[in-house]
Image (cartoon, rainbow, N blue to C red):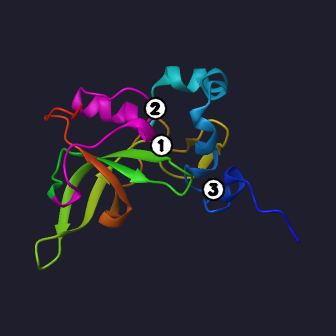
Amino acid sequence: MKPAPSLKTAALSQCAIVFLCASLVLAQSPSFTRACQKWIDQKGYSTDYIEQKTGKRQPGLASEWRGNVAAQDAQPGDVLLIRISADGAQHAALVEQVRKNSDGTVNQMRVSEWNWGKMTDQRCFITENFGKLAPARWVNAASVAYVWRPTLPLQQ
């Protein structure tokens, strides 16, 4: 009988290498900060884009950011924290447009973001769009972990 895969192995096996997933499992460790400091200093991650566009930033990685608005209330200017296949990982993107179903519920949101695309540095989860806009895309409401409206306070 084969041993069960580790959590890290299971999370990585669910990720497509062309996206950010592969190294996100490692991003929580202090060794990530040491190994990737040159990238962190360049400020090209998804959270850096949010700070540039909104003038605000929550502390930590996107996986540590919290929401303050229900996904069904998302509007342009809000920040989506998008679930990634890696365990507990998230990616931040800015809402540009919202599509609703006929019943008024949010279906999809068109986002702008940095660092989403083909992976170029797996260890530090750097993509071909590090520090630059990725092509616009639509995100299904079901893949949204949280919505943060930077103009509203976060709950304590």
Image quadrant in which the C terminus is located: top left
Disc 3 or disc 1, which is closer to the eye? Answer: 3
Image spot of residue 67 (x, y percent): 27, 43
Q: Name the residue under label 2.
A: 44
Q: What element carries label 3?
A: helix
- How far apart marks 3 and 2 lie (CA) works out to 24 Å
| Crowding at mark 2 (Cα within 10 Å: few <14, some 14-19, many 20+) | some
> Is 55 drawn above or below residue 72 in the view shown?
above
Residue 141 part of the magenta segment: no
Q: Name the residue under label 3.
A: 11
Residue sticking out furthest to the bottom: 102
Residue beneath the point at 57% across and 53% down = 86
For badge 2, the amino acid type reads: Gly
Which label's residue is closer to the chain start, 3 or 1? 3
Residue beneath the point at 46% across and 35% down = 45
Q: Which mark is residue 45?
A: none
For badge 1, the amino acid type reads: Asn
Residue beneath the point at 42% across and 49% down = 134
> In front: 1, or 75?
1
Q: Do the numbered discs 2 and 1 sit on residues whose CB atoms are within 8 Å?
A: yes
Q: Mark 1 points at which residue?
A: 115
